[in-house]
Image: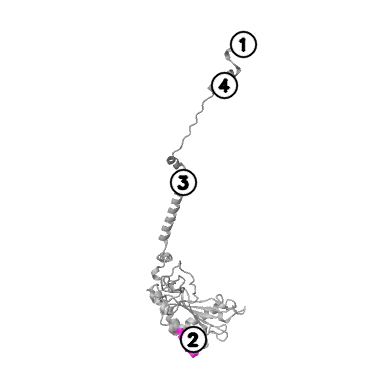
Amino acid sequence: MAEADKAAAGTPEEVAAAEAAAAEALRPIIVVKKIIADDGHAGAHGGAWKIALADMMTAMMAFFLLMWLLGASTEDKKKSVADYFRPASHSQISMGELAGSNGLFGGTSIIDPDGFPFSSKQTAMLERLTPQAQGGPGESFGSSKEENNKDGPSEQDPGKESGTGTPSEKQDKQNFDKLEKEIKQKLSESKQFEKIKDQVSITRDKEGLRIEVIDKADFAMYGSGGAEMGAKAAALMSEVTKSLKPLPNKLAIRGHTDSTGFPPESMRNNWSLSTERADATRQFMQSQGIGANRFSRIEGVADTNPNVPGNPADPRNRRVSITVLNQ
């Protein structure tokens, strides 16, 4: 019977093939579906929008910060910022000729000193050292002249204030110029002050015009350790007082000493000495006709502000400063 079944089933190869077909029929079928995402829909789930938002927020923060700074700034600061970013107009620049001819390629150069704007037109963006030309334009060559500039040359040095101040500042500048010229002229023309005219120093500072009478080895405004004015110093101060009398400006007087001190047992020191000399100068000027209401402050600083820092004992550290204060 078994042999009959094997014969019915067929050969071994056929049996193996039948078994394989049966196993294949029982294997599960797995279907893999791939979904291709739409570019327009999937873009919202990326990170590009975060970068764009961050850029926008940064720009908005910078904008509102700028608005706040402009609102908190004064008009002077706004004008300074505007002047900094104001470009120089080409119409303000007049070129000279350093080389070449006056033809199409006339040899004009941006390093020509005539081509730079005058100081009144100069901004921080254009501030630089003007190169010195080796030969420079000749007097009879080229057409670059200062009068070609419609605004004319600036009479002020870059370090000085421009002429666009308040009326009181303009008046002070005129008064100080006149006062400085007058004092120097008196000292140079008088034989009485021939030997001490170099001991008077006139300088400008932020407070106004400072006039200093400086001691030297053979000239002292006051006697050693005292506050009694000498004859030469009195004559000098008299001339200075005459020049100061017409001005409306307030005056500040400061006394200076050298580092030479008093004996330890003395009740006096350089602080009191410098103050006494400053007040003695005030009394002398007041006796010469300057009203008491003209004096703003009288002070003594001892030897804390030497004129010759390298040598505190130098006699040139002894001096009296008279500052004509700005109005």
Residues 206 and 115: in front is 115
Image: magenta residue range: 182-193
The local secondary structure at tag 2 comes to helix
Q: Earlier in the sequence, mark 2 or mark 4?
A: 4
| Numbered-mark total | 4
Q: Main secondary structure of the magenta part?
A: helix
Q: Is residue 190 magenta?
A: yes
Ranked by sequence position, the earlier of labels 3 and 2 is 3
> Which numbered disc covers residue 3?
1
Marks 4/1: CA distance?
23 Å
Identity, as a three-letter code, of the amino acid under mark 2: Leu
State whether residue 167 is above or below residue 188: above
Tell whether 274 sits left or right of 118.
Answer: right
Q: Quadrant of residue 175?
A: bottom left
177 vs 15: above or below: below
Q: Which quarter shows the N terminus? A: top right
Q: Nearer the viewer, mark 2 or mark 4?
A: 4
Identified by mark 3, the residue type is: Ala
Residue type, label 1: Glu
Residue tagged 3: 48
Q: Quadrant of the C terminus?
A: bottom left
- Which of the two labelled residues, at mark 4 and mark 1, occupies the earlier sequence position? 1
For label 4, the residue is 20
Of labels 1 and 3, earlier in sequence is: 1
> Which one is in front in this view, the residue at disc 3 or the one at disc 4?
4
Q: CA distance from mark 1 to mark 3?
A: 77 Å
The label nearer to you, 4 versus 1, is 1
